[in-house]
């Protein structure tokens, strides 16, 4: 066996061994956990169906303001859960949560709906799995964290790089073993062409389809007339509904870096960028942006560019750790460790595919197959935390730190200066103008959550 083949097989064995030991103790074996999902779109279904795979939960409730999407999700769930039962369907998440009969609530809505749904779910007594980023403004995140602690809820955020088998392996075998030595610089990036380039002529505002309650879908976000780009999934191209590519993709890689290196809050955040290339598009998120997150003796530098090519085509969305002894490249597709002076990696790993245990992964529509195991491991970690009433690996406080750091990057770009956030005070230091941007005005009749009154 040549060395490269040995390393590859060793990586697979380690990942499989880790997976085998990553099974939670289930105290609720005699009573199925009752599960509900708010937001039955792309990742809402991916998350829910991975949960169904690892434990015989009973999905009793689904909620969405798109009646067609909701009905389709109900059919899929009925076909996948062991009972074969079709869940109850809700148009209004408040009506669903009013039942107070959920053990776990999953939130897969667009970002602008995370805060209100999550806080209400905490009040209902459910533990939660909430997609990232946790919020679209900082005060929302503060209120969400306060609610989780006040109501003693276990909340896992969907930053599943912390549960990605080959990335756990990279952290353990490379970083924790000291193979990089001192790490003083990390580059994180995304060069995917994620920004919708349709112009006003190509995508005029129209009347929403009958199956979509667009007013409810828009909810607390600043009002925009309906556009076919918005739904489904296209909302990420608009700052009204999210935090751009920084909030969508940087949050993953920054969170992964913080987890791997055991980092807390950045001391300072600075960002530059804007719409430099695609100025005629309807999308209003930046197409070019760089952000620097300054930690003690370490800079984490983010770059995204939604045009052109990636500098390293094997790592278009990734983190590259530079140490005194070598370089670690890490992504959802692979990791490789290069000691100084070596052109070939001496350690490497690839995603864990589990088709033997979960053959439905091969045929499930829109599933990101290379990250299916990561979502399952993330769900396992959630169940373990629920059983023991402990903090999960991507606890909401970690999600708040990573999300807020990304929001600060966008605010820095907007204001044209560096920002220093004091997590104890919940304020930006010596910058009244920036502090006025920590929360945004909600569209009537929705009320912005207040950390002091959740």
Image (cartoon, rainbow, N blue to C red):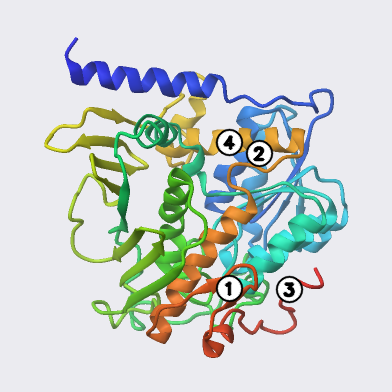
Q: Give 285 or 250, whichever is nearer the viewer.
A: 250
Give how far across and how far down residue 185 sits, in percent: 30, 55
Kindly check if marks 3 and 1 are in contact, taking CB atoms under 8 A apart as contact: no
Whole-number angstrom distance, CA of label 4 to CA of label 1: 29 Å
Disc 3 designates what residue?
A: 449
Disc 1 designates what residue?
A: 137
Disc 2 designates what residue?
A: 382
Q: Secondary structure at mark 4?
A: helix
Q: Residue at x 75, y 75 (%)?
A: 450
Of the numbered discs 3 and 2, the one sitting upstream in the chain is 2
Q: Secondary structure at mark 2?
A: helix
Give how far across and how far down residue 232 sits, in percent: 51, 62
Can you see residue 91? no
Of the numbered discs 4 and 1, the one sitting upstream in the chain is 4
Disc 4 designates what residue?
A: 50
Of the numbered discs 1 and 2, the one sitting upstream in the chain is 1
For the residue carrying disc 1, how many other residues have a C-alpha within 10 Å: few (<14), some (14-19), or many (20+)?
Answer: many
Whole-number angstrom distance, CA of label 3 to CA of label 1: 11 Å
**Badge number at residue 373:** none
Using the rendered view, name the quadrant where residue 52 is placed. top right
Q: Residue at x 48, y 18 (%)?
A: 17
């Amino acid at each position: 066996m040549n060395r490269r083949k040995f390393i590859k097989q060793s990586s697979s064995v380690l990942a499989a061994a880790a997976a085998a030991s990553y099974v939670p103790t289930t105290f609720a074996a005699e009573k199925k956990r009752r599960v509900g999902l708010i937001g039955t779109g792309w990742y809402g279904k991916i998350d829910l169906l991975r949960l169904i795979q690892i434990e015989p939960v009973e999905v009793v409730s689904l909620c969405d303001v798109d009646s067609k999407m909701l009905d389709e999700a109900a059919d899929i769930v009925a076909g996948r859960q062991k009972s074969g039962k079709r869940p109850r369907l809700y148009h209004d998440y408040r009506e669903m949560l009013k039942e107070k009969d959920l053990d776990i609530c999953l939130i897969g809505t667009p970002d602008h709906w995370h805060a209100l749904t999550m806080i209400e779910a905490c009040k209902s007594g459910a533990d939660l799995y909430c997609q990232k980023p946790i919020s679209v403004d900082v005060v929302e995140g503060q209120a969400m964290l306060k609610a989780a602690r006040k109501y003693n809820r276990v909340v896992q955020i969907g930053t599943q790089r912390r549960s990605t088998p080959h990335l756990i392996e990279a952290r353990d075998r490379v970083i924790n073993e000291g193979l990089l030595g001192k790490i003083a610089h990390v580059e994180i990036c995304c060069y995917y062409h994620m920004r919708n380039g349709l112009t006003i002529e190509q995508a005029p505002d129209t009347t929403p389809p009958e199956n979509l309650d667009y007013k409810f879908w828009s909810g607390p976000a600043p009002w925009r007339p309906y556009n076919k780009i918005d739904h489904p999934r296209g909302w990420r191209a608009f700052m009204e509904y999210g935090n751009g590519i920084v909030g969508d993709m940087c949050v993953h890689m920054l969170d992964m870096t913080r987890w791997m290196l055991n980092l807390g809050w950045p001391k300072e955040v600075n960002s530059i960028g804007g719409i430099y290339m695609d100025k005629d598009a309807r999308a209003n998120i930046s197409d070019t942006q760089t952000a620097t997150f300054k930690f003690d003796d370490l800079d984490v530098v983010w770059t995204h560019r939604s045009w052109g090519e990636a500098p390293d085509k094997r790592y278009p969305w990734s983190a590259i750790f530079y140490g005194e002894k070598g370089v670690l490249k890490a992504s959802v597709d692979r990791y490789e460790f290069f000691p100084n002076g070596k052109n070939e990696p001496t350690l490497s790993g690839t995603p864990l595919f589990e088709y033997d245990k979960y053959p439905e992964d091969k045929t499930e529509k829109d599933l990101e197959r290379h990250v299916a195991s990561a979502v399952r491991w993330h769900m396992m970690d959630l169940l373990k935390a629920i059983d023991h009433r402990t903090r999960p690996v991507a606890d909401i406080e970690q999600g708040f730190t990573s999300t807020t750091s990304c929001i600060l990057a966008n605010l820095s770009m907007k204001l044209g200066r560096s920002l220093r956030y004091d997590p104890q005070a919940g304020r930006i230091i010596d910058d009244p103008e920036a502090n006025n941007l920590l929360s945004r005005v909600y569209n009537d009749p929705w009320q912005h959550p207040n950390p002091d009154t959740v």
